[in-house]
Amino acid sequence: MSTLIPELGHFSAFLGLMSAVGIALFGFFGANQNRTAWVDMSIRLTKVQVAVLALSFLFLILAFLEDDFSVLYVANNSNTALPWYYKIAGVWGAHEGSFLLWTLVTAVWTVLVATRARHIPLKLHGYVLGTLGVLSVMFLAFLLFSSNPFERLVPNVPIQGADLNPVLQDIGQIIHPPMLYIGYVGFGVTFAFGIAALATGKIDSAWARWVRPWVNIAWLFLTIGIVLGSWWAYYELGWGGWWFWDPVENASFMPWLAGTALIHSLSATEKRGAFKNWTILLTLLTFTLVLMGAFLVRSGVLSSVHAFAVDPQRGLVLLTIFVLVAGGSLVLYAFRAHTLNTQVQYWGVSRELLLLINNALLVVALFTILLGTLYPLGHEWFVGGDEKLSVGEPYFNAMFVPIMLLLSFALAIAPISRWKHTPMRLVVNALLLLGGSAVVALLLPWILADGVHLGVSCAVALAIWIIVTHAIACYRQRKALTLGFIGMSVAHIGFAIAVIGVAVTSVYTESKDARLKVGESIEVSGTQYELVDVQSTESQNYIGERARFDFGVRGSLFPERRYYSIREHITHEAAIAPGIFKDRYITFAGPMENDTWGVEIQDKPFQRWIWFGAVVAGLAALIAMLDKRYRRLSQRDLEIKYSA
């Protein structure tokens, strides 16, 4: 039986492809012909699809656990010495297995839409399922015919596998990719709702209320995935950074920005029937950016620790999928955009104006990142030669930071704004609060260092202003608060907390490199760090050295340098003493000449605030989803809004 596991996995994936074809056909034709039985068949097939793809994924896990090196993918990404939990993580540690996970997550989202949205109009439901079915067909066809994780390596079966990439042998690798994929594919659901709205020609407050929970949960998981990736880079890669403006990081950040704009646009569409074109375009753009990111990460055009280096031929297939989805959706939009025109009046500092400014700034930020990410690739393709260009941190900071400061200004006014028109006295009162926030912000640099840093003071002032205006707004509306308003406030406050963390840690981090002998010490930010001891370490699949650093009576830190013999790879495991207001961070470089040991020690104030703020913002999506307005619409409302 065990010898047939790869074949069973491959056959299960093929059944998933056949199910996806049925989902697409029955969904589209059922919607077009208004046939309930056909849409019901599409719903039943979603259950078949998720079951067979779950089996396929389980069979791949079993192949890893049994060290079946006759499977090429297992041989390239596992080893007998690898702990069992990293063998499971190895299933999605490279291109083929991670794409199987992608197809499984797509199937899970599809069955959730099929079963949890039964009471939406038949045409809308059918077109949504049909669109998701088409996406599954493309993904599964690419998997089976171009990226088969069950391909056999016979007759030259190796005794040992090549091992999982050592930097991926970490708890972050176990949970980070699945979170990202849930978020990525979740925006495929909102894409499907956008296509269905164009197909039916109906987009209004009822449609917006149905889409918002799906957008919120996709955005939540993508946020968690990005935060976990940032956290993983911080402690695992050993350089102490939390964001590198790496092209692969940007590939996940761009859909997040578009998704954030979509959440705000949906608010205007639901409440005022405004921004319908914005909303539809953002549903299409967000998932298009997801597919573009998949192409960049998996085509081999990028060199990154995060990227899956595969051959250009498979990259061409992914590019084809991207062009078909992006091009097809834009053509449909071009033919149906005339049905979305609305006339909504507003003036002054209205909530509509602030949402428009918010969306414009987010889209400008998105295309700024897109330009910085793609320009080096375009230069290489068109100019050719060996010259390599890179667009790094200076460009992104110079372009992105001012946009975020402008966005912060808009967010601070948001809780006092009103639909149609906001009384000027409310705006003046909010601006007065900015003065008090600035005074507090000017005190922070004096606490952290001697002197004032204007950039930090501006960022902190705006962040405090956001927190204060939202807290006051919630207090004043305490008797009529909705979960939607609370969710908005929590999200903006989380953003403000993250802004404080980014500003402070970027400017006031202190770092020192040294070569120390055992018994010697170095001072960083007024604290003495003594190298007490260095001992050899050995684990199931690596050997290394483990240092002990004492810093006064406060404690000890134990950074490591590891050598993975199978891949002949060295990693540096940072030791971190986390704190609410400061992280102590040590990287151990290993032995140097004259019995010395290389070390880097960093003092990183307010580092945790970045991730705490992002988590708070993510939790806001959960709060908003609990709002009963987004859980159910009466059948009478649906009949009125979607009647033919």
Image (cartoon, rainbow, N blue to C red):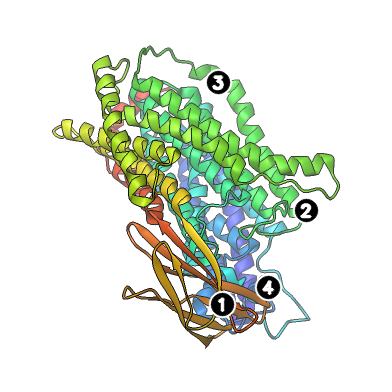
Q: Residue at x 52, y 86 (%)?
A: 537
Q: Nearer the viewer, mark 3 or mark 1?
A: 1
User: What separation in Å lies between label 4 and label 2 (alpha carbons)?
Assistant: 20 Å
**Who comes first in sequence, dot 4 or dot 2?**
4
Give the amino acid type for the residue marked by disc 2 in the picture: Gln
Identify the residue under disc 2.
313
Which labelled disc corresponds to residue 561?
Answer: 1
Q: Nearer the viewer, mark 2 or mark 1?
A: 1
Give the amino acid type for the residue marked by disc 3 in the picture: Ala
Residue farthest right in this picture:
385
Per the image, label 1 sits on a secondary structure element best described as strand
Q: Nearer the viewer, mark 2 or mark 3?
A: 2
Label 1: few (<14), some or many (≥20) within 10 Å?
Answer: many
**Who comes first in sequence, dot 1 or dot 4?**
4
**Who comes first in sequence, dot 2 or dot 1?**
2
Q: Residue at x 65, y 71 (%)?
A: 7
Which labelled disc corresponds to residue 337?
Answer: 3
Label 2: few (<14), some or many (≥20) within 10 Å?
Answer: few
Which labelled disc corresponds to residue 180?
Answer: none
Q: Is residue 61 visible?
A: no
